[in-house]
Image: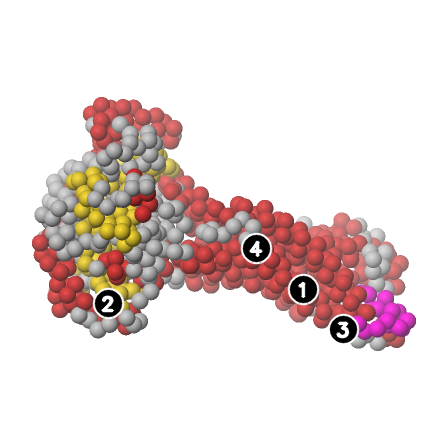
Amino acid sequence: MGNFRQDLQFAVRMLFKNPLFTGAAVLTLALGIGLNATVFSAVHALLFSPLPGIEAEEELVQLYRTYPGMIYGSNSIPHYQDLRDRLEIFDGDVASWKFVTVALSADGRNERLLGQMVSANFFDVLGAPPVLGRGFLPEEAVGEGAHPVVVLGHSFWQTRFGADPDVIGRTIQLNGQPWTIVGVASEEFRGAMRLLDPPFYAPVMMQPNLDMGGSRIELRGSNSNNVVARLPDGATLAQAEQSADQWLLAMREEYPDHYDESGIHMVMQSGAGIHPMFRSAQTGMATITMLVVGFLLFIACINVANLFLARAGERQREMGIRLSLGARRGRLVSQLLTEAILFSVVAGGAGLLLAYWSVGVLNGIRLPMDFPVDMNISVSGPVLAFTAGISVLTGVLFGLAPALQASKPEMVTALKGEASLVGGSRFRLTNLLVVAQTALSILLLISAGLFLRGLQAATAVDKGFDESNQLVATVDPSMQGYDRERTSAFYDQLYQELRALPGVQSVGFAAIVPLTLNSSDRGVSVPGYEPGPEERMSLRYNMIRGEYFEAMGVEIEAGRVFTPEDNQQDAAPVIIVNRVFADRFWPGEDPIGKIVETAGAERVVVGIAENGKYQSLGEDPSEYMYFPHEQVYRHGLTAHIRTAGPPEDLAPLVREAVGRLDPNMPVSDLRTMTNQLGVALFPARLGSASLGLFGILGLILAAVGIYGVMAYTVAQKGREIGIRVALGAQRSQVVGMVLLRGMKLVAVGVVLGLAAAAGLSYYTAGLLYGVEAVEPITFLGVPAVLGLTALTATYLPARRAAGVDPMRALRSD
């Protein structure tokens, strides 16, 4: 203990002895440690940390319905009720929830909110009692439309109601109807899903009043709810799955049409991440990002190791005297390692400050949507432990080799104050570090380059529609109490208002906006077509009205668009399908006039639309159907407005047009289509921006490291260079000699880095859209950029070496 205290005191003195050296080492490490802490904070918060405000999350299980080709299917309300009442292992501790969009009126303000419709036992099952008032009562689990009560989310209570403790019992208007506030959720609670912070929770039995598409409380085939259950003490997931198998046998006998091909898939809540469907992509992206920042930290460690090697040369006389006086080598290594670890711990503290700032920036990011997103990233206990761990490990990584090197100088040479032999092991170690640094930099830069190329490919992909010069705005009259007839009349009037605005070329309406993670599917049957046993016959669709195809820039390859006559409730059933649909069911035939049985009718194909991207940019070409809105009705449409000029200039006029028809009608998601697509591109943009930044930092660190090593090498080889100049070596020969030595090391590092990057790229290829495993531009461009950077970093010391005074160099040695 006494030795450690002495080592620590000496390390503190060394920390302050050379402020320039200390500052360079600490700042270099702080950058690497801070970025690692930031990325780990985000990964831990989004994938591994328990849901806030929930009791014993490790006991919670998510339940999904399965179908052929679908693992994570939603649940209907009757299905949920049977799970709650008849799946014995959970003993009734089964809750349901789903997102629902409503219009809120309170204190004279109107707005559109994305809340949650939950079962009455939701707060009890999750172990999240409200902080004010109460949750929902057992009697509020029965009686359709009989319980207009809400529990407010804590953040919404603070921002919208000023944290008024007397809010319990107040009345607000949801969808034009009075609702009573009965509780306020706890400050930590964010519901059963990450990222979103629901402003309110309402009972599921109020579904017809919240989700204005009609009552689905008794429709067993209407699946849109999520289900979560709590395992009893001592029960396992395997036991729950066995119990569910027995439950399914009974349900198949009772409801064969609904359960013959349906099953149950269970996922532990603690392992679900944002959503289990994207779990592999989430963990893959997290792994790559952590590897990248790990590479960045390793490059920083190499730089600092080179600094410590350089300082070790300056301390040879000190080490030699200590060894000559009987100091054991292990004692010297221990002292030098203590110095290195102290440097890294100080750097870790500075890195934490960087992490706190970076986490604040991440939490301030706002997705291009109207609903509140809560990243909820924090520098938590696990993050602090992680930072402490990598700080100590970093000190060992960059300190061990210099400590071993500095503690074994040639004693006679050291006592004379002379430099060690230039061809010694220190230079071999330095050369090895340059090679490693170059290889890691290549790996880091190629990873960043691949993601940037992926973003470029995703942005340039043919989406099947033209997002330029297009404004979108969502309006849902049903939220203001409009029935179907009034809603249809409102959309007709709004079409006329928008069409008359200056610069508007076409106006269409649709229930679903492409590439917004919102989709629906319906079963289809095509006369004469026999599907295979595992072939999926439930296909995605949209409901449209007005000049939708013109406004979207979607080409009709054959047939015609829908006419106003098609968009009538009593019109002959018609449908438009895309080219993939036509080629699948009628290959080599004319699809116009063919019959598709879906949505409760035999529908005649009147048009063939070009293929497009409907749910994600990376999806394979898939079948798609378009219905006239009045024939397959859904409340809540988005207007697509194509303009001759900048679409954003039209936004105020769109609000005024809606206000002329109904001053209380909320307008949401009013933005250009290009901005709307930001939701689909956000992960790629965020990942590319982050990795691009990491790549630039890696390039800078590599340049600094190579420069430092070459400058140190030139300084140590001053006598050799002086002799060469004295013997008549030309300036160009000296420059060439130094450049050749430096670039040989860089070349070896480039080759090793390219080999490692090629292996890694095969792993990342599935995470990137439109990028080959070995992408030529990236794999050729990155070495060229790094080579030019290394050449510059090597040339500066080489030029200094060429100008050396041979007499001074010989005397100084």
Q: Quadrant of residue 154?
A: bottom left
Q: Nearer the viewer, residue 91 or 422?
A: 422
Q: Residues within 10 Å of mark 3 (few under 14, many from 20)?
A: some
Residue span colored magenta:
714-732
Using residue 290 as the reference point, say whether residue 556 is left or right of it. left
Give SS at disc 3.
Answer: helix
Amino acid at dot 4: Pro
Q: Which residue is mark 1?
A: 790
**Cα distance in 3D space between marks 4 and 2:** 42 Å
Determine which residue is flagged by label 3.
800
Q: Nearer the viewer, mark 3 or mark 2?
A: 2
Of the image marks 3 and 2, the number of the one nearer the N terminus: 2
Instruction: Give the x, y percent position of residue 620.
Output: 39, 46
The residue lying toward the viewer, choosing from 15 and 448, is 448
Determine contact: label 4, label 2, CB under 8 Å: no
Q: Amino acid at mark 2?
A: Gln
Q: Residue furthest front?
A: 589
